[in-house]
Amino acid sequence: MSVIPDRLPSLDRAAAERAARRLDNLTKPPGSLGRLERLAIDLAAIQGEALPRVTPPKILVFAADHGVAVEGVSAFPQSVTAQMVANFVTGGAAVNVFARQHGAGLEVIDVGVATPLSPELIGHPQLVDDKVRPGTANMVKTDAMSPEETEQAIGVGFRAAEQAVASGYRSLIVGEMGIANTTASSALLAVLHDVSLESVVGIGTGIDDTCLAHKRSVIRRAIDARCVDSSDPLGALVALGGLEIAAMVGAFLGGAAHRLPLLVDGFIATVAALVACRLCPSLRDYLIFGHHSSEPGHGAALAALNAHPLLDLEMRLGEGSGAALAFPLLDSACRMLSEMATFSDAGIDGAVTS
């Protein structure tokens, strides 16, 4: 598939070593800032700069609908996706609040919203119309997308990341919106990571126990009907995925191709990251996981990527909100590295010379 890079830039180990040496000469005991120090070294390696910088950040929210919603797997109707897109564009969602707090750019990309958007939203500078099709097909009955549509959706995300780079953004926060996308994500995770549906399928938007059992049954029927090969991540995405999930795959790959640190949100974004890493394993080096969602499948998705999130706030909202809350830690890591005094700067004995 042409939009999937054959290889990504290697981490810059020399920049990481320079950052590590500076950390050990800052006015603190070596390693005393714990994971923040490791985060600073990782950011240096990703960007190829001994003094990395993650501001300004760009938040990309990909929105699309899922045909499997007709099976009654969500507490909300499909029309809510379009309504939430309007909320993002007019600045009323949680992720908007956090974007304003952190000075982040925010863009909402309609890659497959089924309900027509309000005419007054068309042309809004924060809304990108890059629709591949109005929602996926019902994965219980047929493949969610065609291979060509999947490639197009991945391309949407790749281009969005490249445009962020061209606009001067230094890091990406990747989020999503789509009614029934926990259903698609759970199906993908169950296939790609070989875990039981009981352990990964959660309440999503807030369904009750009866609907949860039904949701698991629907996912099992879809997996059985599609006969997906667990060693074929692209085939799994075609059969069981979503347009916004495919777009997030592209955004991760596009950002990494330009050495952007990639802040991954919750369950759905992490499943997209898992698909992307199965397609291009070196992507894993560029991923920083913002938070541990309370969706039960998120722990399994994180384990599949050997990921250790920065926060655990018992959230399950999506839309990039948890990753946005974690962003200040990346900024703090960079500022600590560049703005703290060294022992020699401060005239304090204790510099590390080895």
Image (cartoon, rainbow, N blue to C red):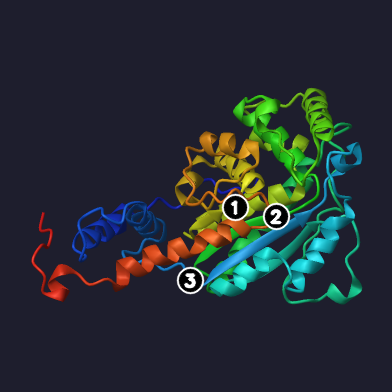
Circle 3 packing at 10 Å, graded few (<14), some (14-19), many (20+), is some
Q: Return the x and y of residue 68 as percentages of the image width and height.
A: 85, 39
Residue at 72% across, 33% down: 187
Circle 2 packing at 10 Å, graded few (<14), some (14-19), many (20+), is many
Q: Return the x and y of residue 205 as percentages of the image width and height.
A: 77, 47
Circle 1 packing at 10 Å, graded few (<14), some (14-19), many (20+), is many
- Which mark's residue is nearer the viewer, 3 or 1? 1
Q: Mark 3 and mark 2 in contact? Answer it, CB < 8 Å.
A: no
Identified by mark 3, the residue type is: Thr
First in sequence: mark 3 vs mark 2: 3
Identified by mark 1, the residue type is: Asp
Distance Cα–Cα, label 2 vs label 1: 9 Å
Say above or below: 345 vs 9: below
First in sequence: mark 3 vs mark 1: 3
Distance Cα–Cα, label 3 vs label 2: 21 Å
First in sequence: mark 2 vs mark 1: 2
Residue at 38% across, 63% down: 333
Residue 265 is labelled as 1
Tell me if residue 83 can be seen: yes
Q: Secondary structure at mark 2?
A: strand
